[in-house]
Image (tube, rainbow, N blue to C red):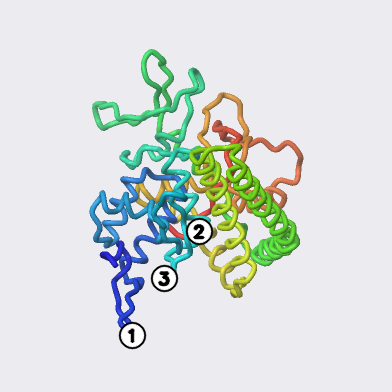
Amino acid sequence: MGKAPAGYINRIREDKTKYIELIEPEASHLKWAFKTIAEGLYPTDHVWKLASARGLRCKRNTFLAAIRNPIYCGKVMVPPDEHNEMFLANGKHTPLISEKPFWEVQDILSGRTKTMRVKVETPINLPLRGFLYCPECNRTLTGSASKGRPRYYYYYHCKAPCKARFKADEINIDFERELQKFVPKPGMAELYKQVIFDAIGDDKKGFKKNRKRLVTDISEQNNVLTKVRALLLSDDIDIEDYKIMKSKCEDKIVRLEAQLNELKSKASVETDINEIVDEALLRLKKLMELYSNGNIEQKRYIIGSIFPEKWTIIESKGRTGKVNSAALLIYQINNMLGNKKAGVRTNSGLVPRAGIEPARFPIGV
């Protein structure tokens, strides 16, 4: 047995057998890093820096190798031989994370999943830099300060030859007005909780359907493997083609099994849902306080979590497109309570684009 990977430590039992065991706080820091990369808001290098600031003792290259190591989701690599390509087998150690988030991270690292990848180095006066599209040329707006006589003035602007330019103070204030609409109205906690419980009930109904689909997909891939082996035995394909097809099938099976295990674990978890919902609602009530008092990183985390789509500044008023599903629920209920007339117009000139799945709403920053 070689040296244990980051977050683990080598151990030996009384019968002299060796194993690896999770060690804190490194394990928790790495788990946080996997979760943060999966959210797709920050570049991988920046996640490493943030994890290091939290206390992770891991060099950059070691970190980049670690987040690609399937050992963290309970798998071990079996090296290739003359008959088989390398494959993953179930390990006997305790996994750091489940398989689904591990493969989500791999998709992000390999570029199969689109992420925000917005710059995080930005002045506190330009929290929306990188989240805005230019209404003239459709490129992402940047931002900078312009020195005036009494002070600096900040602007969101496009790059040459485009001359689009907007006062940052006005856009920031307009954004905060929209953010305020997602704060739950006083006394409505029970209504929100009931809607959430109804949604949980719908999830339970869909569990069997999703489980059946995954089991069917896994079975189909196993059938393909069987056919591929038969083709090899009948000399209809050569060993190299067999290895390629086998590898593709096994990769699909591993990912489908990860989804199935994640589904089962969610269904079997026994948690006090009341406690979780109460904590989430408390954070939502403090949303404006968290945003106003947060540093630039915290502000941008909230922006990207509630509005995972980039925005376009337009002259007409109104808001269209998707936002975070949890925040959207709050907005819809607040809107029904506060604006009973149809066609009420908002003061926002920012319009988020459609087409990107909502990100998870943070219960803490």
What amino acid is labelled 2 in the image?
Glu
Q: Is 236 left or right of 108, judged from the image as shown?
A: right
Q: Quadrant of the C terminus?
A: bottom left
List the single residue furthest toward the top. 161
Q: Earlier in the sequence, mark 3 or mark 2?
A: 3
Q: Quadrant of the N terminus?
A: bottom left
Give SS at disc 2: helix
What amino acid is labelled 3 in the image?
His
Give SS at disc 1: loop
Can you tell which mark lies on residue 15? Answer: 1
Q: Residue at x 60, y 35 (%)?
A: 355
- Real-space CA distance between mark 2 and mark 1, rounded to the nearest whole angstrom: 31 Å
Q: Position of residue 80 (x, y in %)?
A: 41, 51
Residue 165, quarter of picture: top left
Residue holding disc 2: 99
Give SS at disc 3: loop
Residue 68 or residue 228, whichever sits in front = 228
Q: How many numbered marks does the figure carry? A: 3
List the single residue furthest toward the bottom. 14
Question: Dot 1: few (<14), some (14–19), or many (≥20) neighbours within 10 Å?
Answer: few
Asked if labels 1 and 3 touch by Cβ distance under 8 angstroms, the answer is no
Q: Earlier in the sequence, mark 2 or mark 1?
A: 1
Q: Position of residue 46 (x, y in %)?
A: 32, 46
Question: Dot 2: few (<14), some (14–19), or many (≥20) neighbours within 10 Å?
Answer: many
Which label sits in the foreground, 3 or 1? 1
Q: Residue at x 42, y 49 (%)?
A: 82
Q: Is 34 left or right of 249, judged from the image as shown?
A: left
Residue 224 or residue 200, whichever sits in front = 224
What amino acid is labelled 1 in the image?
Asp
Question: Dot 3: few (<14), some (14–19), or many (≥20) neighbours within 10 Å?
Answer: some
- Real-space CA distance between mark 3 and mark 2, rounded to the nearest whole angstrom: 14 Å
